Image (spheres, rainbow, N blue to C red):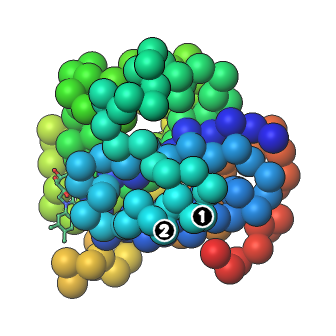
Amino acid sequence: MAKLVVGIGGGVAAYKTAMAVSQLVQRGHDVHVVLTRGGRKFVGAATLAALCGRPPVEDTYDPAFPLGPHIELARGAAMLIIAPATARILASCAWALADDLLSTLYLARDCPTLMAPAMNATMWQQPAVQRNVLQLQRDGVDFIGPESGWLSCRDQGPGRMVEPQRLVEAIERKLGLGGEGSVPADG
Ligand SMILES: Cc1cc2nc3c(=O)[nH]c(=O)nc-3n(C[C@H](O)[C@H](O)[C@H](O)COP(=O)(O)O)c2cc1C
């Protein structure tokens, strides 16, 4: 059982990450969710608490973590997954801003990291966003997606987050477990 920290950012695709969290739990992983300020607008804490068996952590100063949740959650983690990775999260991590719990945890972790970006196509194609992605890749972060297709803003184009099943498969491949097609399609 791997300790996985899943950061959920503020995009419509957060519901896909909730499904991926459920699949990861069903497959025996020890999942800890960090919800950003944006993320909590899109997926409820009660849903995530029920899916992974513990409440999502939202506050850098949460008194349940005397050493700081960024330290305690990062410690022993096999992987940090950020999905959806918003433009803000990409920038905050690329620039080491540590301006919220998730981006502080990003700096405190020493485990492999996988980001699944999602955003409007024009946002995704901005040179500033692409610069941040390139910087994060140079820093050793792996990316999955985004795919091209229907976007919730009613456009078609690049920016759609990968489906939950693909995300789970990528996580398990990176952990050295399982392979393509081994994850059930239902959440
Ligand atoms: C309906 C709606 C959908 C959004 N979808 C995205 C998105 O997919 N990607 C993104 O980068 N920002 C998106 N945003 C903007 C972010 O929520 C906003 O930049 C926020 O500050 C991100 O916060 P976070 O990084 O703390 O999650 C969306 C906003 C709204 C109102």
User: Which residue is rendered at x = 20% and y = 27% of the image?
Assistant: 99
- The residue carrying mark 2 is 47
Q: Is residue 12 above or below residue 28?
A: below
Q: Is residue 93 above or below residue 4?
A: above
Q: How many other residues sit within 10 Å of disc 1, few (<14), some (14-19) or many (≥20)?
A: many
Callout 1 amino acid: Leu
Where is residue 64 drawn, in percent x and y?
45, 31
In the rendering, which numbered label is found on residue 60? Answer: none
Where is residue 128 drawn, in percent x and y?
15, 38
Quarter of the figure with residue 22: bottom right
- The residue carrying mark 1 is 51
User: Which residue is rendered at x = 63% and y = 28% of the image?
Assistant: 77
Q: How many other residues sit within 10 Å of disc 2, few (<14), some (14-19) or many (≥20)?
A: few
The one nearer the camera, 69 or 126, is: 69
The one nearer the camera, 150 or 165, is: 165
Look at the image and tell me in which quarter the N terminus lies: top right
Asked whether the beta carbons under mark 2 and mark 1 sit within 8 Å of each other, the answer is yes
User: For the view shown, which residue lies furthest in the bottom direction?
Assistant: 154
Look at the image and tell me in which quarter the C terminus lies: bottom right
